[in-house]
Amino acid sequence: MRRRLTRAETKARTRALLLDAAARTFARKGFTGASVEEIAEAAGFSTGALYSNFSSKEALFLELLSDRRRDRLAAAAQALDAHGAGTGEAVAELGRLLVDVADKDIEFAALQAEFWLYAIRNPRVMDALAASVRESHQALEGLVGAAMARRGAPDGVCVEEVSTVVAALFIGLVRQRRIDPDCVSEELFGQALNWLFTGINAASDEG
Amino acid sequence: MRRRLTRAETKARTRALLLDAAARTFARKGFTGASVEEIAEAAGFSTGALYSNFSSKEALFLELLSDRRRDRLAAAAQALDAHGAGTGEAVAELGRLLVDVADKDIEFAALQAEFWLYAIRNPRVMDALAASVRESHQALEGLVGAAMARRGAPDGVCVEEVSTVVAALFIGLVRQRRIDPDCVSEELFGQALNWLFTGINAASDEG
DNA sequence: GTCTATACGGCGATAGAC
DNA sequence: GTCTATCGCCGTATAGAC
């Protein structure tokens, strides 16, 4: 009888555990503030094991960036599937997404900020971050397109621009909600989206 | 004849130089990544001089937070004075502000991100950050209130909420513009503001 | 008030046993 | 593939000269 995990499988599992621990630790301490020993111990391994799986602290960090990119794509796809396009629930779903991210996945925003800071300080990494964000935005464009179609899509407005605005709103509100939750109610994101989409239609009616 | 700078004045000048150097260095390397020696040398002093003016690296960082708060208040007040309220230029002025901050003051966004990350990791600092942001938002509310009045202010919409949304948009777009300038044109912020304010009016006409 | 020199600890990364 | 032990470096903060 073959043992339950092959060598390749245990290694993959170790990698996954290390990446999870890295996400937690980087989010809590930042890239520079988190030590490799800390990460390795959080995953239940030693620094030697970590260096056996990743060539350096930076390599681990960048691997995490790619890794989380896939996760976010899956989540966005799921959100799209769950509610479907053009059901009119798109705006509500986006609002729920904000509250979930802001309050539940408290690591998310911190990691995004870390990635952003790292990329503006290490230009060679910026391409990877741009690719990551671009993929996320593509998923978002599905939801935004649905919301616009539902409300009677105007012609002159491109989905990319609206999606960029929605994403910016999202990031900014999540950040502000961490600073002062009273100023960013659970409903504010939905409210802002309503204003935005209403304004898009009104503006296009005029033009 | 009295020498041109008193002791207190030279010390104040040293402090100011150190704070400037700290802003540059923290923005470039981050709070953890920047060393006190690096900061001191950037200001033209030694670490001893730095510790003579600030009790610790953290104290310097927090002093910088308060310091920049005053700067931003002055800038906002100046923007208000220059264009006046209710001239209809408020939206355009906000748009210009974004491009200026995004492209010229490249340290600003990085420092804000550093402050935010530091505050969510050191809850005792969050109050100071909240106060800083609150003051900035008060200044913003002047511009937003002017823009809303100009467009026929609806009654049911509170200025604080709109200002929060505008600030969130601002932060999010500045960040995204650094990742992919092509996706965030110079006009997009103004465009988004137009959508927003148009939507606010349309929504209030319905309600 | 500022500088030089240093104490002291922690970090990233590597080497070699198993 | 993972662990233990360690090297070399750099960090913050301090002490004492001037």
Image (cartoon, coloured by chain):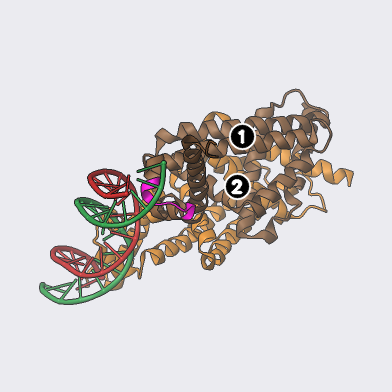
Chain colours: A orange, B brown, C green, D red
Percent from the top left, x then y, of residue B206? Answer: 79, 29
Q: Residue at x 62, y 54 (%)?
A: B176
Chain letter, disc 1 residue? B
Using residue B142 as the reference point, say whether residue A77 is left or right of it: left
- At label 1, counting other C-alpha atoms closer than 10 Å, the crowd grade (few under 14, some 14-19, many 20 or more) is many
Tell me the mark number nearer the camera, choosing from 1 and 2. Answer: 1
Which residue is at the front of the view, B166 or D15?
A: D15
Q: Is residue B162 above or below residue A196?
A: above
Residue A101 lies within the magenta run: no
Q: Is residue B100 visible?
A: yes
Which range is magenta? B42-49
- How far apart, in angstroms, are the residues tagged by discs 1 and 2? 38 Å
Residue A141 has which mark? Answer: none
Query: How would you classify the magenta stretch by its main secondary structure?
Result: helix
Percent from the top left, x then y, of residue B93? Answer: 76, 42
Which residue is at the front of the view, B110 or A128?
A: B110
Chain letter, disc 2 residue? A
Give the amino acid type for the residue marked by disc 1 in the picture. Answer: Ser
- At label 2, counting other C-alpha atoms closer than 10 Å, the crowd grade (few under 14, some 14-19, many 20 or more) is some
Q: Residue at x 68, y 40 (%)?
A: A193
Q: Is residue A95 above or below residue A68?
A: above
Residue bearing the label numbered 2 = A83
Quadrant housing the C terminus of chain B: top right
